[in-house]
Image: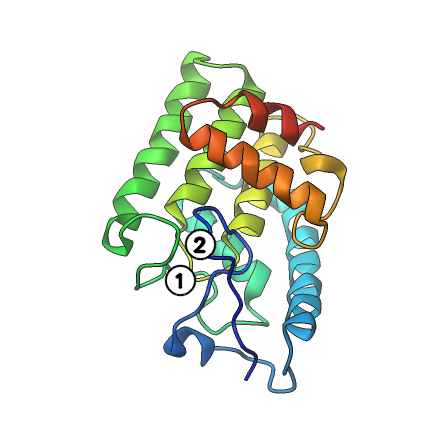
Amino acid sequence: MVKALGLGAPHAPEPTPLDPDEAAGLIPGHISTQSELNEWEQANILEAGRWLKHPARKREDVLSERFVRELHKRMFHRTWKWAGTFRRSDKNIGIDWRQIGVKLRDLLDDVKYQLEHETYPVDEIATRFHHRLVSIHPFPNGNGRHARMMTDALLAKLGVAGFSWGRADIVSTVATREAYLAALYTADAGNIAPLLAFVRS
């Protein structure tokens, strides 16, 4: 069984330490290292990206709990048995797991309101959405990658180009990851500007 790794920081989107029950949900039996797990997950995520680009997705309600769950399931269904299922334990990041459903519905409703009333420019709405979704941390693992793909799905639905996310792999590129996490920390303190700059950098 692969050992789950974690950074222990307030924002550590990949990977969150797994409890024994979650770790037991690993589907491929040949994986024994974190690097093998990362490679397997990335192949699964690329498959989800193709699913997301299918013309049928244009009819989907991106801002729905069903879509949030379905996208996570598509991203990790070949990797984790619990893909698409909200976590049922507390982590080193995220809200109390018992509040996930309520807080997620609040977030989705808030974004719909912001879009309808043009509360902020579209990029800022999407950036704030991303930050709050990461903060909720709805799933046992994969939340950062899921929140980024969810944000790009929202932008695509609105006819806007997806974010560049620092133009590097946030999971494996240390400098980009550090810049991303620093921007999330600053957003936690109420200043969204660095994150807003990062997503288009």
Q: Nearer the viewer, residue 55 or 184?
A: 184
Coloring applied to the structure: rainbow
Estimate the x, y position of residue 80 in percent, counting from the top left: 51, 72
> Does 67 appear above or below 109?
below
Estimate the x, y position of residue 198 in percent, counting from the top left: 64, 29
> Does 105 appear above or below 26?
above
Which residue is label 2 attached to?
Answer: 69
Estimate the x, y position of residue 111 in percent, counting from the top left: 41, 27
> In percent of the image, x 63 and y 37: which residue is there?
179
Please tell me how crowded label 1 is: few (under 14), some (14-19), or many (20+) other residues with Cα within 10 Å. Answer: some
> In percent of the image, x 51 and y 51: which residue is there?
12
Estimate the x, y position of residue 151 in percent, counting from the top left: 56, 37
Q: Nearer the viewer, residue 80 or 13?
A: 13
Element under disc 1: loop
Q: Quadrant of the N terminus?
A: bottom right
Amino acid type at circle 1 is: Thr
Amino acid type at circle 2 is: Arg
Residue 120 seen in render: yes
Residue 153 seen in render: no
- Mark identifier at residue 85: 1
Q: Report whether 105 appears left or right of 181.
A: left
Q: Quadrant of the C terminus?
A: top right
Please tell me how crowded label 2 is: few (under 14), some (14-19), or many (20+) other residues with Cα within 10 Å. Answer: some
Element under disc 2: helix
* Disc 2 + disc 1, Cβ < 8 Å: yes
> In percent of the image, x 58 and y 43: which residue is there?
148
